[in-house]
Image: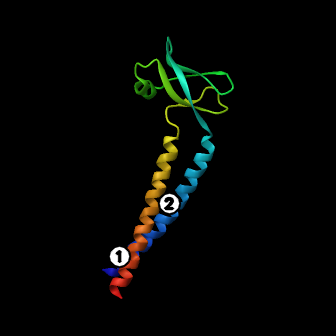
């Protein structure tokens, strides 16, 4: 029985650390490619095509973007909204400072690295319990 636990701990440690490191690298690349997002205050308007937000960027230009259903639901009936705009892209906005996709991949990386660490600790405990 203890050989099976040792084998499982070894497999989970390799898988946990390997996949965790790979996902951490992917999260880092995604974070770097996401760009810089700065806060802005936007005016919410209703048009025949749907609701949209308009804002002034850092350079004095005007940006606008149509709201998705989820964004529209999140803003509700407000006339103004706090948004984040991508520096250098006049018509890109979102409601969160950090990308939800980057956060999800980073959390999966942390989970897999934790699995690897738990497997190593389990392997060490089994080594001393049998010894």
* Precedes in sequence: disc 1 or disc 2: 1
x 54%, y 56%: residue: 24
Local secondary structure at mark 2: helix
Residue holding disc 1: 5
Q: Which type of secondary structure does the marked residue at label 1 adopt?
A: helix
Q: Residue at x 43, y 74 (%)?
A: 10
Asked whether, in this view, residue 78 is left or right of residue 35, the answer is left
Which quadrant holds the N terminus? Answer: bottom left
- Residue topped by disc 2: 20
Q: Give percent across and percent down for residue 9.
A: 40, 73
Picture layout, residue 111 above or below residue 32: below
Q: Nearer the viewer, residue 11 or 71?
A: 71
Residue 91 spot, x, y in % from top left? 61, 26
Furthest residue in direction bottom, as rendered: 131
Q: Can you say whether 111 is above or below 1 in the image?
A: above
Q: Is residue 73 above or below residue 122?
A: above
Would residue 47 be found to the left or right of residue 91 on screen? Answer: left
Q: Residue at x 45, y 60 (%)?
A: 112
Q: In the image, which is nearer the foreground, mark 1 or mark 2?
A: 2
Neighbourhood count class around disc 1 (C-alpha, 10 Å): few under 14, some 14–19, many 20 upward = some
Q: Residue furthest top?
A: 48
């Amino acid at each position: 029985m203890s050989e099976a636990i040792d084998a499982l701990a070894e497999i989970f440690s390799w898988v946990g650390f390997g996949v965790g490191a790979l996902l951490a690298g992917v999260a880092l690349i995604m974070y770097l490619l996401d760009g810089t997002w700065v806060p802005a205050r936007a005016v919410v308007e209703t048009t025949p095509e749907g609701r949209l937000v308009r804002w002034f960027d850092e350079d004095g230009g005007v940006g606008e973007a149509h709201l998705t259903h989820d964004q529209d639901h999140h803003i509700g009936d407000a006339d103004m909204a706090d948004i984040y705009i991508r520096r250098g892209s006049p018509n890109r906005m979102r409601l969160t400072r950090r990308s939800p996709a980057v956060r999800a991949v980073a959390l999966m990386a942390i989970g897999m690295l934790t699995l690897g660490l738990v497997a190593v600790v389990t392997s060490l405990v089994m080594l001393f319990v049998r010894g």
